[in-house]
Image (tube, rainbow, N blue to C red):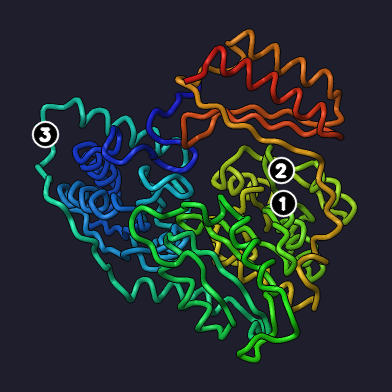
Amino acid sequence: MTQIRQLFGTDGIRGVAGEFPLTRGSVYWIGRALGHDLVRVNAKSRVVIGEDTRASSCWIADRFTQGLASVGVETRSAGVITTPGVAFLARSQGFDAGVVISASHNPWTDNGIKIFCRDGYKLPDARELAIEKEIFALLDSNEGPAPDSTAEISSVPGDEGLRQAYIRQLASSVSSDLTGLRVAIDCANGAAAAEAPELFKALKIDATFLNCAPDGQNINENCGALHPETVARFVAGSRGGANDVAGKKAGFDVGVTFDGDADRALFCDAQGHVVNGDAVLLVAAREMQARGALRNATVVATTMSNMGLELALKRAGIQMVRANVGDKYVLEEMQRVGATLGGEQSGHILFRDGDATTGDGLLTALRVLEIMVRTGKPLAELAGDLKMFPQTVRNVRVHKKTPFAEVPVVHAAIAAAERELDGNGRVVVRYSGTEALARVMIEAESKEPMNRLADAIVAAIRSELGA
């Protein structure tokens, strides 16, 4: 029987900063438990740690580092850096692990701990479970309380050389001249604010940056990949005459928006229409297929990806395989089927024709810009034939995550929806791996049954499990 992890979700450990499991004491023990795991293999283990721009990230990073140091693990800080930046450093700089202090797209009051292996891949479930058992053992042990750390901690700038190594690696991956593009970029007041301006300047791309002034509390606030309409409105509003007062062409060719830790990216076209991860997968898949880089003519998506993507890929002679939600599980399925492209509707895109080991929003942005230049086509044309089935995703806050099959009212509502759709749509009901939410996704050929069936399932969940 598979054991269920209590602390680790689909993307590390996450919660409200200052509350268990992210108290000053528990973070110390989490760091110590990872340290034990590492020194069993290498007594002189080294860890690289990075963080996003939340007010709590610096003290969580400090406490985690103290836990590692208590068992002799050396730590180097990369300061504020994207999640894929830490994954790159772990695999390229000889570290035994990489740690990111971030809650990605969550509100600023939340935070989290993501851990990468020395090869840049996220920890497998079995290893997370083993570390989790040790965390609980330490919490219950007689080793005494964690060393006191009540003083306020100032943000640590980190080793600038580590960040620069990541920026250089991204810049070197570009083989096209992108200087003719004009790009609007929403950094979500998050980790991308530390790298994106330098990266796009190095590539001489004409870029305008939005939400690039983090203050500890404005990460993801009405901006970033959770709110792609923000950059879309900006791009749409920039359209006008032939040239602006500075002599530049009016408007932007494309808009890009990242989430808080920049492991995903969404886009908008020159008219300000949002382009999501499904559309990016289609655009990338066809371009990679054309140049022989799409191994096994296969793309890995998730249960949340739209049926329209599956049909569009099929028309191009490309098979789509579905994995569980979470770029970690997409990657595992990509490795199983030998695919070089995979991703999520939310904007996590994994390119395995290079050496990336996780979703990388900055890399995704560069790849999309390169496709536009190589093909000579605007993003609207590249993604224009993707016809999406009407889809709705509803979130219901729950007080516990009981399996839906064990809740008769919920199980019956799901079964009724599946019977009515009878293959002409999809029903996906799952719990979030990072929040106390049930997610209800319905696709149908028209909006009326989609909304009606979603309402019925949401009502059932709320009545039986609602917070």
Locate residue 200 relative to residue 62 in the image: left or right: right
- At mark 1, the secondary structure is helix
Residue 397: where, in percent of width, then height? 51, 26
Relative to 143, is 229 above or below? Answer: below
Q: Residue at x 40, y 38 (%)?
A: 128
Q: Residue at 51% of width from left, 19% of height from top? A: 466
- Disc 3 secondary structure class: loop
- The alpha-carbon separation of the residues under discs 1 and 2 comes to 6 Å
User: Mark 1 belongs to which amino acid?
Assistant: Asp
- Residue 138, x across and y down, in percent: 21, 31
In the image, residue 101 above or below residue 378 = above
Q: Give residue 335's position: percent from left, percent from top.
A: 62, 50
Which of these two is toward me, 164 or 273? 273
Residue 305 is marked as 2
Frontmost residue, 340 versus 218: 218
Sequence order check: which comes first, mark 2 or mark 3? 3
Task: Please say if the residues under marks 1 and 2 sit with CB atoms less than 8 Å apart.
Answer: yes
Q: Residues within 10 Å of mark 1 (few under 14, many from 20)?
A: many
The residue at which mark 1 appears reads as: 278
Which badge, 1 or 2, is on the more N-terminal residue? Answer: 1
Q: Residue furthest top?
A: 408
Mark 2 → mark 3, Cα distance in angstroms:
46 Å
Label 1 or label 3, whichever comes before in sequence order: 3
Rate crowding at label 3 as few (under 14), some (14 to 19) or many (20 or more) other CA atoms within 10 Å: few
Please state if 141 lies on the left or on the right of 85 as rendered: left
Mark 3, residue position: 145
Q: Is residue 436 left or right of residue 130?
A: right
